[in-house]
Image: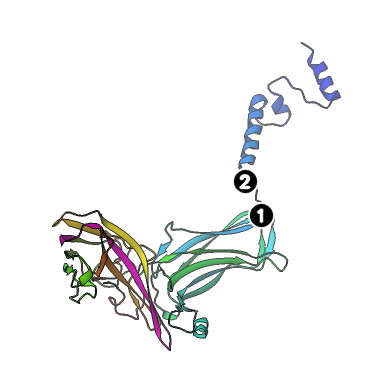
Amino acid sequence: PAPRGVLRAVAARYGLSHCPSRDCGARQGQPGGGRRGARTATSRRGAMAQQPAIEHSSLGMTLKRVDRVYRPNESVEGTVTINAKTGWSHSGIVLRAEGGVFLQQTSRGLGLLDAMANSTRTVTLLQEEVEIAPAGRVPEGKTEIPFEFVLSGSSGQPLMETYHGVYVNVFFLLSVECERGSFKKALKKEIEFIVEVPSPTQAPASSVESFEFTQALSKDGAQRANSDRLPRFKISGKLHRSVCPINLPFTGEIVVEESEAPIKSIELQLVRVETVKTEAQENSEATEIQNIQIADGDPARGIAIPIYIVFPRLFACPVLVTPSFSVEFDLNILVVTEDRTFTETSASVRTGAREPPAGRRGSSGPETLAPWARSLTTK
């Protein structure tokens, strides 16, 4: 082998680094020396490669609760995250909490001008604004700003449950905005959180409610207009609760006593009835929420078919009756026969307000309605 001095001279002549000894890393200023120093440098390069580069500045927001469900008078906690490609100045970071009822007037029964004039309007329930960071400069990289506020209605207004309907929507939003000057686009982020309003009082006693209907008479005893065209049948059943909290399943059973024609299917249809009121008139619209098939084919006579319905979280709520709008619900029983004829009836049940789960009870705040006036009536 060539002497070390010769190798060093050749390396210096051509601008190369040559060090055959293991302690070369230490002489070159690398901690650990030799192979250990090489491994340290490699691990550092890998750690730098794992950190994603920020392509552009962005603004994000997360809540402490994963389900984003809150009740009145509870603390809403979260974090605003700023990813800055380069440092920049701003005129302040503002957090807004907004909530309200968005009403959309149905055009049915209205003229063109009336429909355009009264198409939408909003009833404010929550309106809060706070500056979480004063004007200053955001450094390069990632910056986190925590926030917290107590959820309560504006001006003593009681909060309502989050509900997504067709003509009535109860919404609650959190938005954060950062103004960066006239030559840069403002950064904005908006997320929705869910509000649940538990019952402030104990639910009233519930009892089993039985029903029965035939081709000639509906459940309430009214004469059917098309009874002469329907095959002869008799269906009975019962509902396990006449008053059911909205967060509990709606259960019962249905029994086919007799049917002249073979039955193809039995379905349960949950329908919402939304009414938007104006000074001139009020318009109601019924739309389907969900349809559940509880029997496929001709069921055996005299056998109880169970009814089990879980109310959709965002598409059902306790009944809301206010001077501006109302939300109610119908539960229809559809019996379809093999010859494509079907009959429709309705069973009535009153569903009470939400019961708070154990260990997480909160006050519902001021109420303008009786505790059980805000309940879901299914008929």
Q: Give neighbour class at mark 1: few <14, some 14-19, many 20+ (Cα, 10 Å).
A: few
- 123 on left or right of 317: right
Q: Is residue 328 or residue 247 the one in the foreground? A: 328
- 47 on left or right of 123: right
The image shows residue 152 at horizontal and vertical percentages of 42, 73
Q: Quadrant of the N terminus?
A: top right
How many numbered marks have been drawn onto this rendered protein structure? 2
Report which residue position mark 2 lands on: 52
- 85 on left or right of 231: right
Magenta: main secondary structure equals: strand
The image shows residue 24 at horizontal and vertical percentages of 71, 24
Q: Which residues are magenta?
A: 255-284
Q: Is residue 27 or residue 193 the one in the foreground? A: 193
**For the residue labelled by badge 2, is the local secondary structure a helix, a strand or a loop?**
loop
**Residue 207 in view, yes or no:** no
Query: Dividing the picture into quarters, in which one does residue 51 lie?
Result: top right
Report which residue position mark 1 lands on: 56
The kind of residue on which mark 1 rests is His
Q: As displayed, is residue 13 above or below residue 168?
A: above
The kind of residue on which mark 2 rests is Pro
